[in-house]
Amino acid sequence: MPKIVIIGGGPAGLSAAIYASRANLETTVLYTDGGALGKTDKIENYFGFPEAVSGAELLARGQAQAKRLGAALVQAEATGIEYAEKGFVVKSTAGVFPADAVILATGAPRAVPPVAGVTEFEGRGVSYCAVCDAFFYRGKAVAVLGQGEYALEEARVLLPVAGSVTLLTNGSEAPAELPDGLALDTRPVAAIEGGDKVAQVTFDAGDPLTVDGVFIAYGTAGSSDFARKLGAQLDGNKIQADGAMATAVPGLFAAGDCTGGLLQVAKAVSDGAQAALSAMRFVRQQ
């Protein structure tokens, strides 16, 4: 049976799971939380609800429906997607999931960390993709700004290539286990500095860290991060998808807020349904 992995458990991801399951596809949803919907107090503009419904209740109903139809909902953080001999492999904190097609539905992109120099040095030493840019830092000193599983995955990609890799947690608690060879600095970061290119990271206290590049892996990976790593086209931080919710990468689809447009539950549900139907047609043609 073809395997579909959906990253994101909001209305777009759950809608995709419902349609994929009804199409007799082995469907797995990886999610960390309910996203923006789970935090919404009242929704009064969604079809079929004459009275206001909380986002948490609407989310719970969607989860129950997806489960009833056979989708596996796995509460885990997706940390990476790689190409496989056939399809993809999705890495997560709950293990590795093979997929014939992947649907990205993690909502709108997260904010860039509020550190001076991040925006100014984008493309000049600040990167958001270790898989894409590790090659340019062969034998050089780099840092990864972040503290979760996503940051550790970026560090693992860089370690065999860069001369040194330092994890910057920006004042947050360090992970319990670090990969061999990964240096650690938990000091609050003040700025990323340099001239034409990144030259150092300064802290609220103490000596600066000399680096040639800084990889941003703040929080958890979003849809645009995964899309960028696989070579899909972006418009800013929005994934470019056609009317069938297909990206430029065969087998990779996107749905919901990560594609921009109207940031409403109604659109997310529609996008998810279309992405699942397109994924179904794709895997059946392989």
Image: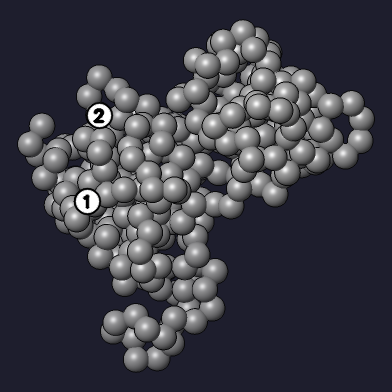
**Number of numbered discs overlaid on the protein picture:** 2
Q: Where residue 107 sits: x, y (%)?
A: 44, 56
Q: Residue furthest bottom?
A: 50
Query: What residue is at 47 percent from the left and 68 percent from the top?
Result: 37
Residue position marked by numbered label 1 in the rendering: 242
Occupied quadrant, residue 203: top right
Q: Which residue is depicted at the point 62% across and 43% down? A: 119
Please identify the quadrant where the C terminus is shown: top left
Classed neighbour count for the residue bearing mark 1: other residues with Cα under 10 Å, few (<14), some (14–19), many (≥20)? few
The crowding category of the residue bearing disc 2, from other C-alpha atoms within 10 Å (few below 14, some 14 to 19, many at least 20), is some
97 lies left or right of 135: left
Query: What is the three-letter code of the residue carrying label 1?
Result: Asp
- The residue sitting at the right extreme is 206
Residue 243 coordinates in the image, percent (x, y): 19, 55
Q: Is residue 30 left or right of residue 285?
A: right
- Residue 165 visible: yes
Check residue 87 in the rendering and tell me which mark sits there, or answer none. Answer: 2
Disc 1 element: loop
Q: Is residue 132 left or right of residue 171?
A: left
Res. 13 in view: no
In the picture, residue 264 is in which quadrant?
bottom left
Q: Mark 2 and mark 1 in contact? Answer it, CB < 8 Å.
A: no
Please report the residue visible at 51 percent of the width from the left and 56 percent of the height from the top.
Answer: 33
On-image quarter of the N terminus: top left
**Percent position of residue 127, x then y:** 56, 32
Q: Residue at x 54, y 32 (%)?
A: 123
Cα–Cα gap, marks 2 and 1: 20 Å
| Residue 248 to residue 71: above or below | above
